Amino acid sequence: MAPSSTNRGRRRVVLLPLPYQGHINPMLRLAAALHSRGLAVTILHPETRAPDRRKLPADYRLVTIPDNIPPELAASEDIASFVFALNKNCAAPFRDYLAGALREEEEGEDGRLAFVVADVDWFAPLSVARELGVAALALMTTSAARFLVYLAYPSLCRQGYLPVQESNLNTTVEELPPFVFVVRDLDCVKDMAGHLAYADLLAHIVAGVRQSSGLIINTFEDIEGMEIERICREITLPVFAVGPLHMMTLSSSVDSSLLTEDRSCLDWLDTQRSNSVLYVSFGSLVGIDTDEFLEMAWGLADSQHPFLWVVRPGLVRGSESSTLPGELQEKMGNKGRIVSWAPQQEVLRHPSVAAFLTHCGWNSTTESISEGVPMICRPLFGDQMGTARYVCDVWKVGVRVEVENQLKRGEVQTAITRLMDGKEGEMVRERMRDLRHVVLKCTSEGGTSDVALQRLVDSNV
Ligand code: UDP
């Protein structure tokens, strides 16, 4: 393929996002950051949830490779099986692509291939690239703390912390920073088969990173300095803390949303009082049961605050619609607005938004911090519990919905009141203002993330 004139002579980077919204967003933000620093970009994507070519900048290349993954598996909550299938099915097509790209480079038809970046979960390409003599880095889209859990997982199993059991949920985990983790913050997989599959997946992820040329993490020094340092000691590879990635590039240069954003909610926010609205969203992946959904709705209805709630298709397991019982609708009146997908960053930036009731996905958490919006945390699985621990007990920029097992009436409302109306909320807001300044410093010119990004661009990994 002939090089486009704007890319002539530019070193090229090939980026492989895992096809989930929470992974595509940071990878495309990294692409934009590298592009703005002079690299030509190729996005290599499996067929599943491939991005719309028209939404990418004109001089990006989009290469789609076959993955042979049944749509039912791609849509299911069985992420481990999906990830294993992706790694297995895409290894050969990726090898063919990379060998072809290297031939084109040799024939002088394309700029030099600088490096490949693959999501840590898409580990097979890391060893394929290595075999073909191409530098390949892994991108950890979530926190450094979570990567430490990955590294420690076998030892946590040997020491009896994992698999999680009802009896040890509140046992303190002495081994890991921030030294306030309890077992329930590590994991929520209680059945043995699920635990073994997850442990196997993490072993593959860690082995992939260890074979790579370096690890890029969507975090920043001032928030996870100790964790980053520990990772550097344990993996003895270059580590680049270049996040939060949405701050490293103009948001207008990245449109990676898989769902259509309902932008009318911004007009609705314009009609609300400054600093009054609770934004509620559980990200792109979490599924909740009807009881949790209704309790959440009662909590919002019973609170005194207007709210904007993202109820995406598939959020409520086994239900296509978000229709609420008449009694609840009546109670809510017109103080709430429900949308199926929102322009989240713009919502968080809106002056009417006072707080974010979130599942603590890493992107949502860092987006909230960057806009200085305090959080009410209702984590449900994976890294979300650990992130909620940091938000509430380490950085202290949010409060938790205190839940024993099932969400009960009053629990959401209590957390909303604590943050929005009480003295505790005042202190949380103040700390959030401070943390926001720290993010702005890290990501501005000369800040640690800016320097790390340039080190990555300049590196000959
Ligand atoms: N998001 C969005 N609109 C919504 C809800 C979420 O654009 O209505 C985006 C959000 O800004 C974030 C991503 O989807 O970048 C969700 O990632 P996160 O890591 O928070 O959660 P996940 O979806 O992986 O659970």
Image (cartoon, helix red, strand yellow):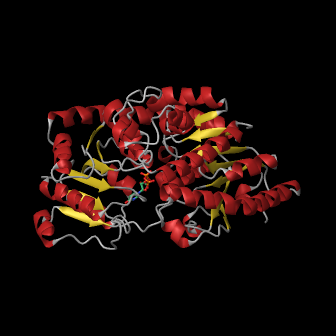
**Residue 37 position within the rendered picture, expressed as x and y whole percent measured from the top left:** 63, 45
Q: How many marks?
A: 0
Q: Is residue 68 left or right of residue 330?
A: right
**Residue 415 position within the rendered picture, expressed as x and y whole percent measured from the top left:** 20, 44
Rendered-image quarter of ligand 1: bottom left
- 447 or 129, which lies in front? 129
Q: Going 82% across and 55% down the picture, which residue do you hit? A: 102
Q: Is residue 341 left or right of residue 195?
A: left
Q: Is residue 302 visible?
A: yes
**Residue 305 position within the rendered picture, expressed as x and y whole percent measured from the top left:** 16, 53
| The N terminus - image quarter | bottom right
**Residue 361 position within the rendered picture, expressed as x and y whole percent measured from the top left:** 41, 49
Q: Is residue 445 visible?
A: no
Q: Going 34% across and 49% down the picture, which residue do you hit? A: 349
Is 323 above or below relative to 130?
below
Please identify the quarter of the rendering in which residue 299 is found: bottom left
Q: Residue furthest right?
A: 107
Is 34 above or below relative to 226?
below
Q: Is residue 72 left or right of residue 212?
A: left
